[in-house]
Image (cartoon, grey):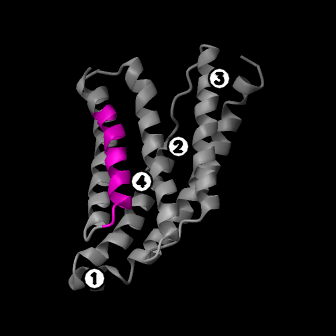
Amino acid sequence: MNLPNKLTVSRFALTGVFLAMIFWRSPYNDTAALIVFCLAGITDFLDGKIARDRNLITNFGKLMDPLADKILTCSAFIALVERCQQAGWSGVKVEAWMVVIIVGRELTITGLRLLAASKNVVLGAEGFGKHKTISQITSIIALLVLEAYGEWGHWAEVGLKPWVPTFARVALYLTVILTFSSGVLYLWRNRRVYLDEV
């Protein structure tokens, strides 16, 4: 297994650690969850860059890299919905309907790609979809910062409090819009697959 694939597999493990941190109540668990999620996001950037730069692209990577991304982000959004229901949550509320749109989009596009693969058609990622992924990771980090900065002492809370909630709220709604619109656009552009035109 080459380095990019190892980084992809590590993202699955980091997702499990992230979920453990976000639900384990301790003085610094939210900070730990933020750090682990950021590490997972870095592996997402590195595995693709290394694979392209060193010509290490494999079928395993083509399959597992986007799957690892989806599991990481969907797990984070689902976990944040539950955390919002718990006592002591002071951040921006992540609504269940938002996560339904996000998870539903990812499942739909994954199903479309599987259908295309069964017809020997390869559907690659598009620029709009990459922007969607960046917006998802950004909004999750913003939401985690919003909850974690209370663990960093009074100076951090004073410095971050004025703008972090607004940024997190805007990032969250932008993510929902980008996720939905990119999914609709992807389905439209590749309609020949599910309309049996290929």
Q: Quadrant of the N terminus?
A: top left
How far is the residue under mark 1 from the one under mark 3?
Answer: 49 Å
Callout 4: SS:
helix
- In the displayed structure, does residue 43 sit left or right of residue 121? left
**In the rendered view of the protein, which quadrant contains the C terminus?**
top right
Q: Position of residue 42 (x, y in %)?
A: 29, 46
- Observer-side mark, 2 or 4, equals 4
Amino acid beneath label 1: Gly
Q: Which residue is mark 3?
A: 115
Which residue type does callout 3 highlight? Leu
Q: Secondary structure at mark 3?
A: helix
Q: Is label 2 or label 1 in front?
A: 1
Query: Mark 3, residues whose alpha carbon is within 10 Å: few (<14), some, or many (≥20)?
Result: some
Q: Main secondary structure of the magenta part?
A: helix
- Residue of label 2: 129
Q: Which residues are magenta?
A: 7-25
Residue 79, magenta (yes or no): no
Q: Is residue 23 magenta?
A: yes
Instruction: Please give the name of the residue rendered at 51% of the width and 62% of the height, measured from the top-left corner.
Output: 82
3D distance between C-alphas at marks 2 and 1: 33 Å
Quarter location, residue 168: bottom left
Q: Position of residue 172 (x, y in %)?
A: 51, 64
Real-space Cα distance between discs 3 and 4? Answer: 27 Å
The residue labelled by disc 4 is 137
Marks 4 & 1, CB-CB < 8 Å contact: no
- Vertical arrangement, residue 119 with respect to residue 129, above or below: above
